[in-house]
Image (cartoon, grey):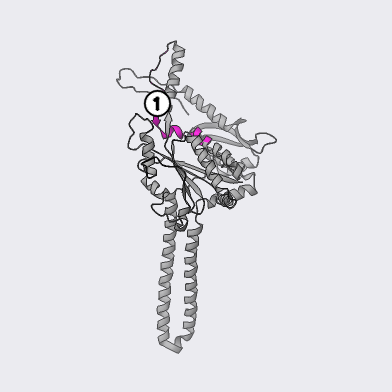
Amino acid sequence: MGFVVLHIQKPKGNDSGTTAHIERTVSPANANPERTHLNKEFIEFPDGVDNRTQAIQHRIENAGIKRKISHNQVRALQIMLSGTPEDMQRIQNMGKLDEWCKDNIEWLQETFGKDNLVSAVLHMDEKTPHIHATVVPIVTGERRKIREKKKTEVQEQEQSGKRKYRKKPTNTVRLCADDVMTRENLERFQDTYAEKMQKYGLGRGIKGSEARHITTPQYYRDLFAINEELKEDIEYLQDQKQEVYEKVRDMYDRKDEAREKFLNMHEYTQQKEEEITDLQTRIEQLKQDYEPYKAQGDINLLFNVFPHLSERLRIAQLCKAVGLTIDAIKQLFKGDVITVTGKLHSPEHDQPFSVQNAKLQLFKESKDSDRLKLSINGQNILDWFRQKYQEVKQATTYYKRPGIKSDVYENKGVKM
């Protein structure tokens, strides 16, 4: 089974460059102009709206937003949907690409709201079919920080016996990308999208994977760097070729005396010409084969051949993030118990915690499961980190220093 590809970005400011790329008013280097006519736009623009950029502004102006929008506020989310290249080719060969597109549009509308989906374009002129969707992050209700603050105030009021009531409306329409792209929402998006794509033989990627999406600008920068290096190699070989030709002409002037040397240099010249031809062929092959998903396809094949490798990779990445050395990780996989004194880093809280003669060991969740856990003194290390974090949080007290007009707070000697 292949993997789904779901990538969401929230660019700030004017995204007219993205519109030009999506609508092909400019031609990207990795697109085939002879196939551009196969691209499709699935969302019909409102009357008077001619392109994606105008559609974003039209949605914002007609959503009922009363609060002023700042110049650097995120106005639209860029969403790219696809799958591993070989699986997308299989879906296309089976004649199910139109059905795949329909399910993608349904998932986008159900997840982000039909009115908020202002554009969805299928690109068929690149090596792997994919959809570029544009979602305006219109939400209703209070901001997340206000909700959390109000919840805290309610708890304090209940403890003190007093109760305050806010008269501000809680159904305000807002433009807020942060409320859409919370950690919980992003995980839910990956889960629900993978469920929608199951019938096409596509599954969810590995949770917690270190793999990162290669952006289009980074792809072009990498390709440009490769091409520049190859150009330098070609120029060097061409200079060598010219030098050889000059030597050959000089040898012709000597006639019989240099005949043997000339034959050797002629062979050398032919060899260099073949090297130049091979190098030029390599450049063209790199242009055709270079694709951000190629490495992911190799990883997918490796995981299919070795099913337990995925779980071992996840645990190895966790051990590395905690701060263990490679030798220590090897000992854990051998089944040894290692003793650690110093600091262990919590990836969840981005904070170190001190340990003294702590015992670390790997164990299975259950007899019938291949899923591994890292324990510290017999306790799941993730639960141990959360417990230590709560202890530090509860032990931290703050007070207002008297005699100072502004609010100044100090941490009273809590040691982590």
Q: Is residue 363 left or right of residue 174?
A: right
Q: Residue furthest top?
A: 161
Depicted 384 relative to depicted 304: above or below = above
Residue 10 at x, y percent in the picture = 42, 40
Instruction: Give the camera-side residue of 118 and 370.
Output: 118
Which amino acid, by three-letter code, is at mark 1?
Answer: Thr
- Count numbered badges in the picture: 1
Disc 1 element: loop
Instruction: Give the camera-side residue of 293 and 209.
Output: 293
Q: Residue furthest right?
A: 367
Residue 251 at x, y percent in the picture = 42, 84
Residue occupying the point 45% across, 10% down: 161
Q: Which residues are magenta?
A: 163-188
Instruction: Give the camera-side residue of 152 and 323.
Output: 152
Residue 68 at x, y percent in the picture = 32, 31
Q: Is residue 307 left or right of residue 84?
A: right
Q: From where the camera sits, is residue 290 visible?
A: yes
According to the picture, the residue beneath numbered tag 1 turns out to be 172
Query: Residue 49 lies in what quarter of the image?
Result: top left
Residue 357 at x, y percent in the picture = 57, 32
Q: Is residue 138 left or right of residue 343?
A: left
Mark 1 neighbour density, 10 Å: few (under 14) some (14–19) many (20 or more): some
Residue occupying the point 31% across, 22% down: 406
Residue occupying the point 49% across, 46% down: 131
Instruction: Give the camera-side residue of 88 and 95.
Output: 95
Q: Residue furthest bottom?
A: 256
Q: From where the camera sits, is residue 74 visible?
A: no
Magenta stretch containing residue 339, yes or no? Answer: no
Depicted 219 relative to depicted 179: above or below = below
Magenta stretch containing residue 185, yes or no? Answer: yes
